[in-house]
Amino acid sequence: MTAQAFVPTPVTRRPREPYVRVRELERDLAARVDGEVRFDPGTRGAYSTDGSNYRQVPIGVVVPRSVEAAAEAVAVCREHRAPVTSRGGGTSLAGQTCNAAVVIDWSKYCHRLVSVDRAAHTCVVEPGIVLDTLNLLLRDTGLMFGPRPSTHSHCTLGGMIGNNSCGSTAQAYGKTADNVARLEILTYDGLRTWVGPTGGDEFERILAEGGRRAEIYRGLRDVVGAHAGEIRRRFPDIPRRVSGYNLDQLLPGGDFDLARALVGSEGTLVTVLRAELRLVPAPKAESLVVLGYHDIAVAGDAVPRIAAHRPLQLEGVDDKLVGYERRKGMHPEALKELPEGGGWLMVSFGGDSQEETDDRANALVDDLRGSDHEPHVAFFDTERLEKELWEVRESGLGATARVPGMRETWEGWEDSAVPPERLGDYLRDLYRLFEEFGYGDASLYGHFGQGCVHTRIPFDLVTADGVRAFRAFLDRAADLVVSYGGSLSGEHGDGQSRGELLPRMFGPAVMTAFEQVKAVFDPDDRMNPGKIVAPYRLDENLRLGPGWTPAEPDARFGYPADEGSFQRAVMRCVGVGQCRRPSGGVMCPSYRATREEEHSTRGRARLLFEMLDGHADSTVRDGWRSEAVRDALDLCLACKGCSHDCPMEVDMATYKAEFLSHHYSGRVRPAAHYSMGWLPVLARLAAFAPRAVNVLTHTPGLGALAKRAGGIEPARPVPYFADLRFSDWYRRRGPRGDGERGTVVLWPDTFTDNLTPHIGRAAVAVLESAGYRVVLPPRTLCCGLTWISTGQLGVAERVLRRTLRTLAPALRRGTPIVALEPSCAAVFRSDAANLLPHDRDAVRLKEQTRTLAELLTRTDGWRPPRIDRDAVSQPHCHHHSVLGYDTDRHLLRDAGVRLDAVGGCCGLAGDFGFTAGHLDVSLACAESELLPAVRDAGPETLILADGFSCRTQIENAGTGRQALHLAELLASAIRGDDLGPYPERRIARRPGRPQVLGQR
């Protein structure tokens, strides 16, 4: 057969790396590519790893502004023979999105929905679009993209195409490959074309045209034809065969679907420029059945009978995962809803009506009655409960990654797949293998309806013996899954984790076919080299590894949850990437404003990891003095959103304060650290002549000079100081009422005391009406917040010790401390005990600090006054992340308030929005959710915000509204005020007049 003449020499080993003149490459990319070209140490460090066990420092990063710019970047790389790696959300778990290459990050700019064809149920997208964003844009069409990985809030379609992603809904809709119609591709040598199913006539036409396209088609036909028998024999016929190249899509007699064949190739063959996707009707209703079994293997045995009912999702969760989530305090309400059992199946049905989905769910339950291992059953058809229960399953990676009292767990064998009818026995054998290697703490969960099993395993990846055991386990596990007729990967792809193991699954003939296909597209191995074909060993390029020797620097914070180690705290980030969500929760406002990896929680954690200098090629070599780390942390708003929203509870605000403390030790600090870091002292001085200070700061010329001297944003108005501090007013007034419910200490924070004393007065009225005797500390104190946020931790520690000495009598009597400013309450509940880990009074302060809503809702017999209003509320970031906003939510609901609590961060965030150079990011954060919600609110709608920063941003942004503190609202309702339209105008009596942003 003459076709053999076109079979290329296979790529069997990585070629010797050509010498790349990096500076010339950077120069040419910057000159020719419309985008951001970054070869600096900070960027390279941030992109050195993904969600996997692997780390490779890239040559540089290109962030193209368009698909055309990305194509030009590949052309420049080709001229310099530089390798190329495409990257979307960077959540890959097998190492396929980190490489010693030029990384093209599609996510910042190339995220357009190009077109939608409702009739054909298709759309065309760019690679950087996030899955949830795409489905939101498609909502009005009634269509959606079917596969839905657990990272749906932040994974990109380009990444899903690269990995052949699946998720829970693949049970009904199939893998990404099953939902791709066509791809626009670019080869390393410059061929750009659309590919998809190719009929016989079209195939012959392509060959007749000649050229590079014909060469590729002919070569693929001949390679696959030569190995067709082995491909049919060695490719397992299971729903989740994701490992290897999809050569089954090119077999003789089929559609020769090159688009499907390229899905899952992990950027090793081509660059995907655009994709035409197949869409499915979005279910209008869903019902969820949770089935409890004796253990997870028995649950696996039950899968085939349940799958026959054709559910939308069929997921498994074991008792270890549930136990770890309970230990970490995750989803407590949802976990209470689980039926009795030691292993659970979550089965959902979708349809056009609730009645239809409920009928299908009930039919399943009826069918399981009297069956072998009849399960315990819980049935749900309300959206809230279903969402909470699905979060239990979707949080699997985060829940199992850093469990208190347990060894750290890692990926590496996290998505094997077997025939669903053999799942139960596979789970038993896999667990026996865990026990043999001492990995018995590993949890088992996953997409059981399709036989896909997720886990994280307590590998030792830092000692030579541990890494040898890691390799030995993977060899045995690969043989086990192959013996079951399964796939090494059922979702996450091969990358470096499984590339070396592929011969065990496919055999030498199919591996030769893979290597020849690589040669057809990329004979010089420039496309994501070392992944899938001619792979790196699975135990090289480890993010840790036996040679990892990080510094263990002295730290100012105690890090009690991390064994007192800053290094262990930094290692909390495992690359999940939830900080890259475009909406929902608070984390991460600076990423949402900039769409920059370095300005995400993950990117900053990566740079801090590099700063610890554990590898010979660490990109950050100057430790605490690093300007790259400082610049990445500069846009961190210290919102603490990550400490709550990140499944690993990364606390970047604390790490930032730690870094700044060392970075500026013995050095002159930025002016803003003095003007705003020392605000409590300056405010106390201003109290002696507040009117004179107000004149100075609000007189043109003088005010500008004062801002410039203090490093304050020129366009940001300086707040007015009150004529009379709240604490001075109260001391003149004294306590009132009989205090039948006891005494509380009302904390007069700097903002309430000096800038918004009316809020303090309102709180006194509310507390006294509730039957409390209100007292204030006997002298001016501070929580230390402003010194903490600017990294002046020595001062903060002294300030806190002074505060604890003063409050000690009240604390030791068990007197509640009521804090009105959420950020100050958060210091008392979190930072103080972290900074002073051995101070018992700091622990008492943490335990006894209450928000106003917390104290009132715990007061027996107290009921809120009736407030029949709509309200838009901005929970302060620290309220959301440290204190919890649910108590306020319930109080307002009980008062008759119809609440719309806005997500995201206000963007002012203490000193951040006041600091010169931060205004654009500050306003971008506010425009994400807060300001549109305020502008859309009607005049009768209440605008609520307990945080001084949030209220200031709302006012400064020119919304025409001023936000109220909960204390003001309750005090007004107790008085029986007629609120009318714009109720804040009747309630709030602030110093000075409303202020808006001025000219810069």
Image (cartoon, rainbow, N blue to C red):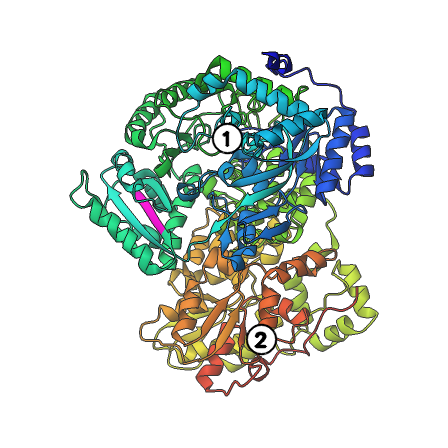
Furthest-left residue in this view: 370
Please tell me which of labels 1 and 2 falls first in the chain. 1
Above or below, comparing residue 582 to residue 687 in the picture: above
Secondary structure under badge 2?
helix
Amino acid of disc 2? Pro
Towards the viewer: 593 or 293: 293
- Give the residue at x 49% y 57%: 142
Q: Mark 1 sits on what residue?
A: 493
User: Which quarter of the picture shows residue 550?
Assistant: top right
Amino acid of disc 1? Gly
Q: CA distance from mark 1 to mark 2?
A: 59 Å
CB contact under 8 Å: marks 1 and 2? no
Q: In screen coordinates, is 480 left or right of 880? A: left
Mark 1 crowd level (few <14, some 14–19, many ≥20, 10 Å Cα)? many
Q: Position of residue 176 (x, y in %)?
A: 50, 39
User: Which quarter of the picture shows residue 626?
Assistant: top right
Numbered disc in front, either 1 or 2: 1
